[in-house]
Image (cartoon, rainbow, N blue to C red):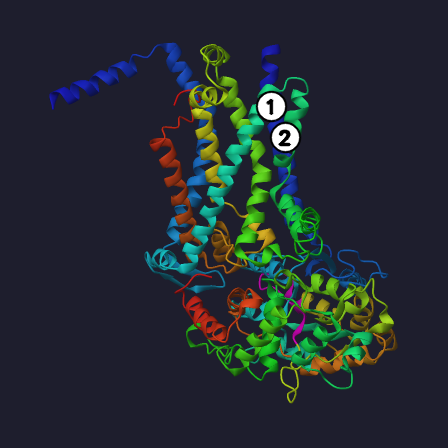
C-alpha cells in the first residue's frame, strides 16, 4: 500500500519535475495537435457511438413511429443469417487472393524499381498510374472490358486460344468468373501502392549486408530469403495490414460490376444496402458495427500478433 | 513590426475563409430572398432535355420554363436533375424527404416508389379543388398508380408501358404476325430459335428485372402482393402460385435457350435495346422510347405489338411505368407547387412533352394529336394507348422497395430458376419484411 503511494508520488514528482523546455514543448504539442484531436473525436467517436446506439433498435427511416428497442436482436439476426456469412466468405476470398498476388507482384515491381537506375522517376510514375485512377472509373473500365458486347477480353482470349474460347463468354454470369474479374481489377489497381511501400522497405536494407552475403557465396535466393526479406519485414507487414484493411472494406468494384448478383455481395455492400437502400437504420448500423469489429480484430492481430510497429517503421 | 504581420495576415485569411464559406451557405439556403418571386424546385428525372430549357428539346425543363413564364410572376421554377436509374432516383428523393428538405416543391416520382413515400407521410396533400382536374381524361392505370388508401396522393404526369418490338422481316420468316395476332412468350422463344435471332429482355439485378417478373406474374393472372395496402405483418404474397411458377419457367426458358443474348444477367433497357438494334436482334420488350432510339435498324422494318402473353388464351398485362408529380410535405409553397403541376400536366403541355420526349402522356386526348401520331407513326401511338388500358402497375405497397430487391436477388441468375424458386422467394420476402432475414 505504502509502496504504491510512494511510487505514485514519485511519478508525480518526476512529472512535475519536467524541465521548462520539456513543459513548453508538451504544451505546444497539445496546442498544435489539440484542435485536430478534438475534431477527430467529434467526427469519428460521435458517429461510432451513435451507430452502436442505433444498432439496438428496429428502426426504419420511412416509418419512424414504429421505432422499437430490440436490444441485440439485430446482431443475432445478422450473425445467424446465411447471407451475412456468404458475404463474409466472398469478402475474405477477395482479401486473400488479392493480397497474395499484390504482394508477389508488388515485390517484383519493387525489386525492378530498386535496381533500374536510368529512367527511375519515369518508371515510378508509370507504375503509379493505375493507383491514381479513381476506383469507380477503373471498375467501369474493367466492366466494359469483360462484358461480351463491349469487351475485348473475350476477343483476345479467342485469338490467343485459336478460336477455342467462346466469344460470348459471360464473365459476370457466374460467381467465380465474376470474382475473378473483380480480383483482377483490384490487383491491377492496388499493386502499385504495395510496390511503393515495399520499395521503401527495400531502400532500408543495408547494401553492405547484401554484399557481405554475396562475398560469402550466398545464392540469389539465399540473399533474398535470408537477408533482404527479414530486413524489410516491417514494410511487408505494414503493406499487408493496409491492404487487408482496405480489401475487407471492398465496395466499388463489385457494386459497379455485378451489383451483388451471383453471390458477389461483400460485407460493405450489405451494410450499404441495409442502411442506404432499405433505410433499415437499425439493422444497417448493426452490420456496420460488426464490420468495424472485424476491422479492429484484424488490426489487433497484426499489431499485437505480428508486432507491427506502425510508428517506428524500422523495428519489428 | 515585421514580427506582427503573420498573425494579422492569418487572421485576415481566416476571416476571408469564413466569409466565403458563409456566402456559399447562403447561396445554398435561400431561394426567395427579399420577398421576391418564390422559386419552386422541381426534381426531374432525366429525359431528352435534361436541364436544358429550350423549346427544341421540349423536356421537363422546358415545361418548367413555360409554366413559370405563364404564371405572370407568381412563381419561378428551378429544375434539379435526378440520377439516371430509378433505384437511384428513389434514394435521392427518399433521403431528402427523410431529412426534411424544404426544397422538395415538385418531384418527378416513379410510380413504383410513390406509395412508399405516401405511406411515410412525406407528401403534402392534394388540394380538394384540384382533385377532379388531376384525374380528368387520364388513362386508368395512371390514376390507379396515383392513389394510396383510396386517396389521390400524386398527380399523373406521363404514363409509360412496355410494348413488344419486333423486326417485321424476322417475324415474317418465323411465321408470326404479332400486330394482328398476339403472341405468347413460348412462340417468341421458338421464333427466335428458328430464325437464329435474339430477344431483348431486362434481367440485371435492378428495378427493370422486377418490372419483367411482375409483368409475367400479372399476365399469368396472378399478383405479387394480393393486399397491397396492408402493413408488413399482414401482407399476403402471391408469388408462390401457378402464376409465379409460370413466370419463373418463362424466364428460365428465355435465359437457357440462348435467345436472350450472351449476357442476359447484366442486361438493362440500354443493353437489350442494343441487342435488338444489332444484327441478330429479332424481338424486344421495352418502353416506347425504343422507336426513337434505334440507330442501326431500318425503322421501316420495325413493328410494335401488344406485350407478349403468358398463355394464349389470356390477355397480357404490360408493365406500367411513367412519372407521377408530387409535392413534398416540407415545401414552403405547396399551393403554388400544385398550381405549377396543374400547368405542367395540362393537355397542351402533355402533348408537347409526348411529341418531343417520346414519353407517352397520361391524358387520353393527347394521343389523338396529329403531332403525336407523327412522332409515333404506323399506329404505334394508338397501340401505346391500348397497352396503357391493360397495363398493371407494380404492387402499390410501401414495401415494394424491399420486395423488388428480394425478387431480383432470388430470381437470379435467370438461367437457374426452378419450380421451387417462387416458393422459396415468397418465404424469404416474408422473413425480410418481418426483420428475420437480411436482404
Residue A127 position, x and y percent, is 63, 30
| Front residue of A118 and A132 | A118
**Magenta stretch holds residue B328:** yes
Q: Earlier in the sequence, mark 2 or mark 1?
A: 1
Q: Residue at x 52, y 64 (%)?
A: B409
**Magenta stretch holds residue A96:** no
Residue assigned mark 1? A113
| Front residue of A11 and A253 | A253
Above or below: residue B317 compared with residue A98: below
Foreground label between 2 and 1: 1
Q: Does residue A7 appear left or right of residue A54 in this picture? A: left
- Disc 2 is placed on an element classified as helix
**To which quarter of the image does residue A110 belong?**
top right
Q: Residues within 10 Å of mark 2 (few under 14, many from 20)?
A: some
- Which quadrant, please, contains the N terminus of chain B? top right
Q: Residue at x 76, y 82 (%)?
A: B176
Residue assigned mark 2? A127
Amino acid at each position: 500500500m505504502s509502496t504504491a503511494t510512494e511510487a505514485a508520488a514519485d511519478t508525480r514528482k518526476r512529472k512535475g519535475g519536467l524541465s521548462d523546455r520539456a513543459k513548453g514543448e508538451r504544451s505546444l504539442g497539445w496546442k498544435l495537435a489539440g484542435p485536430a484531436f478534438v475534431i477527430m473525436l467529434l467526427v469519428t467517436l460521435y458517429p461510432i457511438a451513435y451507430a452502436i446506439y442505433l444498432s439496438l433498435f428496429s428502426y426504419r427511416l420511412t416509418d419512424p413511429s414504429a421505432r422499437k428497442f430490440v436490444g441485440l436482436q439485430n446482431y443475432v439476426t445478422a450473425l445467424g443469417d446465411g447471407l451475412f456469412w456468404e458475404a463474409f466468405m466472398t469478402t475474405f476470398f477477395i482479401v486473400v487472393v488479392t493480397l497474395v498476388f499484390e504482394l508477389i507482384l508488388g515485390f517484383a515491381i519493387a525489386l525492378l524499381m530498386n535496381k533500374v537506375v536510368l529512367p527511375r522517376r519515369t518508371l515510378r510514375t508509370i507504375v503509379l498510374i493505375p493507383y491514381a485512377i479513381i476506383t469507380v472509373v477503373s471498375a467501369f473500365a474493367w466492366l466494359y472490358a469483360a462484358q461480351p458486347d463491349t469487351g475485348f477480353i473475350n476477343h483476345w482470349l479467342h485469338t490467343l486460344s485459336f478460336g477455342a474460347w467462346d466469344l460470348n463468354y459471360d464473365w459476370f454470369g457466374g460467381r467465380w468468373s465474376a470474382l475473378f474479374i473483380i480480383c483482377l481489377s483490384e490487383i491491377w489497381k492496388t499493386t502499385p501502392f504495395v510496390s511503393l511501400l515495399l520499395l521503401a522497405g527495400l531502400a532500408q536494407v543495408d547494401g553492405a549486408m547484401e554484399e557481405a552475403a554475396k562475398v560469402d557465396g550466398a545464392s540469389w535466393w539465399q540473399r533474398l530469403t535470408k537477408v533482404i526479406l527479414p530486413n524489410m519485414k516491417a514494410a511487408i507487414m505494414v503493406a499487408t495490414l493496409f491492404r487487408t484493411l482496405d480489401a475487407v472494406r471492398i465496395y466499388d468494384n463489385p457494386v459497379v460490376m455485378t451489383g451483388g448478383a451471383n453471390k458477389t455481395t461483400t460485407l460493405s455492400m450489405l451494410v450499404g444496402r441495409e442502411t442506404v437502400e432499405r433505410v433499415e437504420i437499425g439493422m444497417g448500423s448493426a452490420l456496420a458495427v460488426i464490420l468495424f469489429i472485424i476491422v479492429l480484430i484484424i488490426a489487433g492481430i497484426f499489431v499485437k500478433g505480428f508486432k507491427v510497429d506502425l510508428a517506428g517503421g524500422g523495428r519489428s | 513590426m515585421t514580427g506582427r504581420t503573420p498573425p494579422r495576415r492569418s487572421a485576415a485569411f481566416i476571416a476571408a475563409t469564413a466569409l466565403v464559406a458563409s456566402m456559399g451557405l447562403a447561396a445554398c439556403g435561400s431561394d426567395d430572398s427579399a420577398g421576391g418571386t418564390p422559386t419552386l424546385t422541381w426534381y426531374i428525372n432525366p429525359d431528352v432535355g435534361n436541364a436544358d430549357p429550350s423549346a427544341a428539346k421540349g423536356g421537363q425543363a422546358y415545361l418548367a420554363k413555360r409554366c413559370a413564364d405563364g404564371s405572370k410572376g407568381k412563381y419561378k421554377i428551378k429544375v434539379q436533375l435526378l440520377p439516371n436509374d430509378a433505384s437511384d432516383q428513389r434514394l435521392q428523393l427518399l433521403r431528402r424527404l427523410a431529412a426534411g428538405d424544404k426544397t422538395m416543391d415538385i418531384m418527378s416520382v416513379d410510380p413504383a416508389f410513390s406509395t412508399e413515400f405516401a405511406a411515410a407521410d412525406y407528401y403534402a396533400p392534394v388540394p380538394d379543388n384540384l382533385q377532379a382536374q388531376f384525374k380528368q381524361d387520364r388513362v386508368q392505370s395512371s390514376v390507379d398508380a396515383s392513389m394510396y388508401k383510396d386517396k389521390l396522393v400524386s398527380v399523373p404526369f406521363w404514363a409509360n408501358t412496355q410494348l413488344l418490338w419486333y423486326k417485321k422481316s424476322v417475324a415474317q420468316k418465323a411465321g408470326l404476325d404479332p400486330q394482328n395476332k398476339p403472341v405468347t412468350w413460348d412462340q417468341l422463344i421458338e421464333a427466335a430459335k428458328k430464325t437464329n435471332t435474339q430477344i431483348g429482355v431486362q434481367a440485371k439485378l435492378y428495378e427493370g428485372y422486377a418490372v419483367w417478373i411482375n409483368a409475367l406474374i400479372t399476365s399469368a393472372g396472378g399478383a405479387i402482393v394480393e393486399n397491397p395496402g396492408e402493413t408488413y405483418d399482414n401482407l399476403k404474397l402471391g408469388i408462390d402460385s401457378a402464376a409465379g411458377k409460370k413466370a419463373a419457367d418463362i424466364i428460365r426458358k428465355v435465359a437457357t435457350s440462348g435467345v436472350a443474348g450472351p449476357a442476359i444477367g447484366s442486361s438493362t433497357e440500354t443493353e437489350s435495346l442494343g441487342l435488338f438494334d444489332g444484327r441478330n436482334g429479332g424481338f424486344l420488350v421495352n418502353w416506347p422510347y425504343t422507336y426513337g432510339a434505334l440507330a442501326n435498324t431500318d425503322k421501316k422494318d420495325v413493328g410494335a405489338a401488344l406485350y407478349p402473353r403468358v398463355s394464349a388464351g389470356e390477355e397480357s398485362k404490360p408493365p406500367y411505368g411513367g412519372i407521377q408529380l408530387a409535392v413534398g410535405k416540407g415545401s414552403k409553397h405547396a399551393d403554388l407547387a400544385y398550381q405549377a403541376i396543374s400547368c405542367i400536366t395540362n393537355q397542351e403541355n402533355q402533348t408537347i412533352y409526348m411529341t418531343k420526349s417520346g414519353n407517352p402522356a397520361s391524358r387520353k386526348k393527347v394521343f389523338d394529336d396529329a403531332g403525336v401520331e407523327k412522332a409515333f407513326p404506323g399506329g404505334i401511338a394508338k397501340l401505346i394507348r391500348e397497352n396503357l388500358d391493360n397495363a398493371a402497375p407494380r404492387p402499390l405497397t410501401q414495401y415494394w422497395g424491399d420486395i423488388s430487391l428480394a425478387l431480383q436477388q432470388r430470381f437470379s441468375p435467370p438461367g437457374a430458376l426452378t419450380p421451387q424458386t417462387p416458393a422459396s422467394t415468397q418465404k424469404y420476402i416474408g422473413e425480410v419484411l418481418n426483420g428475420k432475414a437480411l436482404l
